[in-house]
């Protein structure tokens, strides 16, 4: 049962994905470093390291994407 | 999700429809008949665009006397951002501001940067999407080939 | 556009060197990978962090760094290294006060008074490791990324060594940009092979972890984006903590358990298989009037040991002038306990699994942090950018902070502080 909201969310993401509305030249804000999904700092890595050594949970980190898609 | 109205290789380069603050068209292809045009769409927040500028400037300085024109249409939302970048990284080629952002729509732009190489007859001959270090060699070859036509 | 330097520190997850050997922590084995462009110039990072827990009971110093070098136009190579030094004492065993007998002083509990009947929820004391432990870990990761137009491939191998623990891992990652780069799909797979040889026991054990990862990012508007991710992890082998002990009140020997030197005290024993799953959502929104970015994350985790957890995190990135940024963060974490966890056991269980490791107990953690960064560009002919960071995070871990009700003892509650300073150089 818990999976239903996830599936609905994913379908709606796919739905949004098929109707692009942010043009290539409109991604100046998304290109800002503080808008990136994942921070590549070592500070982040040590903090995540610390959490996972104290807590019994794993996974769930950002996988990629975001930014201006410049290429 | 292909773009039906995207500008294609072999087509006549379209003019841009709107007039900008300086009271001129961001790009008017017929002005450059007889020249080989490198038409570039860029913004200061776009890292590959920033990377390409010094390289384009070098190409332009080398080939302008042979009839190459570089026109870079800026798409920053705040013009000041572009001006700041240009102050730190001055270039000799032409910068045009498209305040209404109609030109990228006319060309149905899908990537930043995008560049169109237009021959002496005004026909789009090559399209480059994105920019990586080293791409300038290919652009150089393309421009030379069109110049010799 | 933004260059993503994958900083995978040999993630064996044990800041607490020996004491986390074979602990619950499962490394995040699947490397972060971002579709995009390779860097055009080399970059290097160095960071020093200091971790301190419970009034200096534990101190850890962590030195780490990385170098990323572009290769031709379409590839980059990365090297990450870490050296951490642990010193301090950690809890080994919980004993009900009524039966703990001491002949050598406070921490020297050396026998058990078996004439007492122990009931649940009695007052307990924590028995700590005797002498202060000192241990050093070395880790190295090598990574290679290859960039195609819309596709990024990454391969990482990791190696980590400390006196009682050896870990080798590899990770494969793929990210694909499509839909005019408004959508990114990422997939990852990794395996970790660990060897555990505890300094205090004559055993040598192995453990293998597997992880698959799925991620989907979507640009929602000019100023917001969302990421959905799902992870599945599967561990087999020796998943117990060889240093932890449990008290079990029993009149007869407990099957399959190894006695740990005192009557009714045994070594921690966990199942040899563990399935874990996590789903997470991350949302980023730009707040135009302040030029700030708000990042909100939620993760739900569940495993086959009956632990589930919720994690909420909010981070605010506030530029305070052209080159300065202030980044406050708040985090709340809550987990339920493993089905075979108790502070101590008043009777045997139907399955031969027992643990009193507080990492498997029900608790919550509330933490707050602050980071300040500054950068200078066009430093000189050789250096394009230098960035400095200082950060700290303070956390309170307590059983009373658990979501819902718990009867787990508060004896293992503690606070910790993490301080970091880092420098990043782009050539």
Image (cartoon, coloured by chain):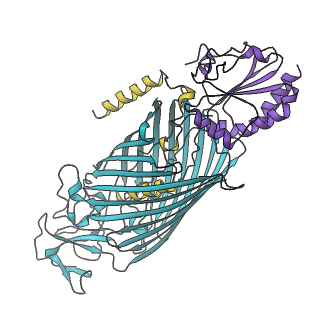
Asked if residue C79 lies left or right of residue B12, the reply is left
Q: Position of residue B125 (x, y in %)?
A: 76, 19
Q: Position of residue C171 (x, y in %)?
A: 54, 48
Residue at 48%, 41% in the rendered image: A35
Q: Is residue C52 above or below residue C4?
A: below
Q: Position of residue C427 (x, y in %)?
A: 67, 53
Asked if residue C389 lies left or right of residue A56, the reply is right
The reply to whether residue A37 is in sight is no
Residue at 36%, 46% in the rendered image: C314
Give C53 or B22, whichever is nearer the viewer: B22
Q: The C terminus of chain A is located in which quarter?
A: top right
Q: Quadrant of residue C65?
A: bottom right
Q: Is residue C130 above or below residue C76?
A: below
Q: Report the residue that reaches farthest toward the front.
A: B22
Q: Which chain is cyan?
A: C
Q: Report the residue that reaches farthest toward the bottom.
A: C104
Q: Is residue C218 above or below residue C265?
A: above
Residue at 31%, 51% in the rendered image: C333
Q: Is residue B36 above or below residue C54?
A: above
Residue at 30%, 73% in the rendered image: C260
Give B26 or B140, whichever is nearer the viewer: B26
Image colour for chain A is: yellow
Give B98 or C404, whichever is nearer the viewer: B98
Q: Quadrant of residue B87?
A: top right
Q: Position of residue C289 (x, y in %)?
A: 42, 38
Image colour for chain B is: purple
Q: The N terminus of chain A is located in which quarter?
A: top left
The reply to whether residue C223 is in sight is yes
């Amino acid at each position: 049962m818990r999976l239903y909201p996830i599936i609905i969310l994913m379908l709606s993401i796919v739905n949004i994905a098929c109707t692009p509305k942010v043009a290539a030249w409109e991604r100046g804000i998304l290109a800002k470093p503080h808008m990136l999904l994942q921070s590549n700092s070592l500070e982040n890595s040590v903090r995540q390291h610390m959490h996972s050594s104290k807590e019994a949970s794993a996974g769930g980190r950002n996988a990629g994407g975001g930014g201006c898609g410049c290429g | 999700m292909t773009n039906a109205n995207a500008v294609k290789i072999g087509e006549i380069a379209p003019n841009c429809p709107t007039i900008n603050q300086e009271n001129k068209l961001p790009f008017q292809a017929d002005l450059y008949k007889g020249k080989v045009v490198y038409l570039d769409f860029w913004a200061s927040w776009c890292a590959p665009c920033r990377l390409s500028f010094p390289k384009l400037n070098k190409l332009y300085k080398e080939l302008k006397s042979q009839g190459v024109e570089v026109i870079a249409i800026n798409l920053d939302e705040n013009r000041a951002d572009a001006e700041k970048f240009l102050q730190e990284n001055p270039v000799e080629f032409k910068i045009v501001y498209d305040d209404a952002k109609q030109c990228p729509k006319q060309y149905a732009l899908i990537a930043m940067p995008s560049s169109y190489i237009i021959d002496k007859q005004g026909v789009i001959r090559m399209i480059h999407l994105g920019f990586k270090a080293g791409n300038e060699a290919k652009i150089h070859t393309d421009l030379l080939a069109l110049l010799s036509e | 556009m933004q260059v993503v330097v994958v900083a995978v520190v040999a993630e064996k997850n044990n800041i607490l060197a020996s004491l986390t050997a074979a602990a619950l922590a499962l490394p995040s084995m699947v490397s972060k990978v971002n579709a995009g462009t390779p860097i055009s110039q080399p970059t290097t990072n160095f960071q020093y962090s200091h971790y301190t827990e419970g009034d200096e009971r534990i101190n850890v110093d962590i030195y780490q760094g990385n170098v990323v070098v572009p290769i031709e136009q379409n590839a980059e190579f990365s090297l990450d290294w870490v050296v951490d030094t642990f010193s301090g004492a950690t809890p080994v065993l919980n004993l009900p006060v009524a039966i703990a007998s001491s002949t050598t002083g406070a921490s020297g509990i050396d026998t058990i008074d078996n004439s007492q009947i122990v009931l649940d929820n009695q007052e307990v004391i924590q028995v700590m490791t005797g002498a202060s432990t000192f241990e050093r870990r070395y880790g190295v990761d090598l990574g290679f990324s290859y960039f195609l137009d819309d596709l990024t491939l990454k391969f990482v191998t990791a190696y980590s060594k400390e006196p009682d623990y050896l870990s080798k891992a590899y990770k494969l990652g793929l990210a694909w940009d499509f839909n005019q780069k408004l959508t990114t799909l990422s997939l990852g797979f990794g395996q970790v092979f660990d060897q555990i040889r505890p300094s205090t026991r004559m055993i040598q054990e192995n453990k293998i972890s597997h992880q698959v990862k799925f991620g989907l990012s979507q640009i929602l508007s000019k100023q917001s984006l969302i990421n959905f991710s799902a992870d599945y992890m599967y561990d087999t082998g020796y998943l117990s903590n060889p240093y932890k002990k449990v008290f079990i009140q029993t009149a007869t020997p407990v099957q399959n358990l190894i006695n740990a030197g005192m009557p009714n005290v045994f070594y921690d024993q966990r199942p040899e298989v563990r399935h874990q799953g996590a789903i997470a959502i991350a949302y980023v929104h730009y707040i135009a009037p302040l030029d700030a970015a708000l990042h909100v994350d939620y993760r739900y985790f569940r495993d086959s040991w009956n632990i589930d957890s919720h994690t909420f995190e909010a981070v605010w990135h506030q530029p305070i002038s052209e080159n300065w940024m202030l980044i406050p963060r708040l985090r709340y974490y809550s987990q339920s306990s493993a089905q075979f966890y108790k502070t101590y056991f008043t009777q045997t269980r139907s399955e031969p699994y027992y643990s009193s490791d507080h990492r498997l107990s029900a608790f919550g953690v509330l933490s707050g942090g602050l980071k300040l960064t500054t950068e200078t560009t066009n430093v000189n002919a050789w250096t394009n950018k230098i960035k400095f960071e200082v950060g700290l995070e303070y956390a309170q871990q307590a059983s009373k902070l658990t979501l819902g009700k718990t009867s787990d003892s508060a004896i293992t509650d503690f606070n910790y502080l993490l301080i970091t300073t880092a420098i990043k150089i782009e050539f």
